[in-house]
Amino acid sequence: MKVIIWGATGMVGQGVLRECLQAEDVTAVIAVGRSAPVAQHAKLQSIVQQDLFHYDAIIPQLTGIDACFFCLGVSSAGMREAEYRRITNDLTLAVATQLAELNPLMTFVYLSGSGADSTGKSRTMWARVRGGTENALLKLAFKKTYIIRPGIILPRHGAVSKTPFYRFFYRLLGPLLSPLRPLLPNFILTTEIIGLAMLNLVRHGSPSNILDSAAINQIALASPR
């Protein structure tokens, strides 16, 4: 399969990229972002795109793709709703709408977060925005659309967060949380698990379009084929 990743330089995106490059059934990986991933591989093509809202110049490179793993996102800390909505909702839909037009047989997998509210009633700003984005994505004409809502995510295999607060969090609490992962596999995930789950959603599908941490972990454990 040929896949495309948005946000491959973020912590989760790094983990997804690694699993895609290692997967035998993934023949080509396109990474789109404002900077190129550190990883290098014969299957990897990096597209550095400063304007992430408009893709007319690279449309030929966005066709014939089987799956999109959308891992691009920002923390809502210190952001006003309009600013957070522009990145989280408007940018996501600009990408997804373009891809749906070019690749109607594509599977689109969106990295959301535990607590996202699709009813629009939450008092928490980020939860409302994320939930609204999820609803809009599920209406687009993809072959399949999946929303994953992980909670705690531990970086693995050198994955590093771009957000200073998260880097501090993982340095401080990572050594405490890692031993708990085997005991609480349905609550504490890793970047590797998320990458495997995204690939298995394309391979096998899921009866549910929205998956929590427990479902993500179970799908990751499925056989690749």
Image (cartoon, rainbow, N blue to C red):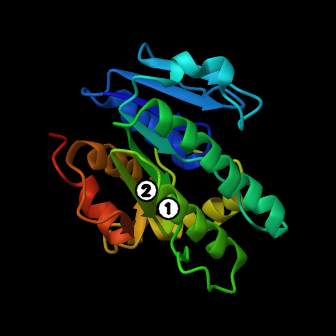
> What amino acid type should be assigned to the residue bearing mark 2?
Thr
Give the quadrant of residue 220: bottom left
- Up-down relation of residue 210 to residue 191 (above or below): below
Query: Residue at 39% of width from left, 70% of height from top?
Result: 212
Q: Nearer the viewer, residue 149 or 104?
A: 104
Q: Quadrant of residue 88?
A: bottom right
Across the whole image, how many numbered discs are drawn on residues? 2
**Which quadrant is the N terminus positioned in?**
top left
Residue 72, x across and y down, in percent: 61, 47
Question: In which quadrant will I find the C terminus?
Answer: top left
Residue in view at x 76 percent, y 55 percent: 86
Where is mark 1, residue-wise? 153
Label 1 sits on what residue type? Ile
* Residue 140: image location, x then y, percent: 47, 51
Q: Report whether residue 202 is seen.
A: yes
Q: Which residue is mark 2?
A: 190
- Depth check: give the residue in front, 205 or 161: 205
Q: Is residue 133 left or right of residue 15?
A: right
Alpha carbon distance from label 1 to label 2: 5 Å
Which residue lies at the image location 53% right of the left edge and 40% below the top edge? 14
Q: Is residue 164 visible?
A: no
How many C-alpha atoms fall within 10 Å of the one at disc 1: few (<14), some, or many (≥20)? many
- In the image, residue 135 lies at what x, y percent? 51, 65
Mark 2 neighbour class, 10 Å CA radius: few under 14, some 14 to 19, many 20 or more? many
Q: Residue 147 in the image: x percent, y percent? A: 43, 60
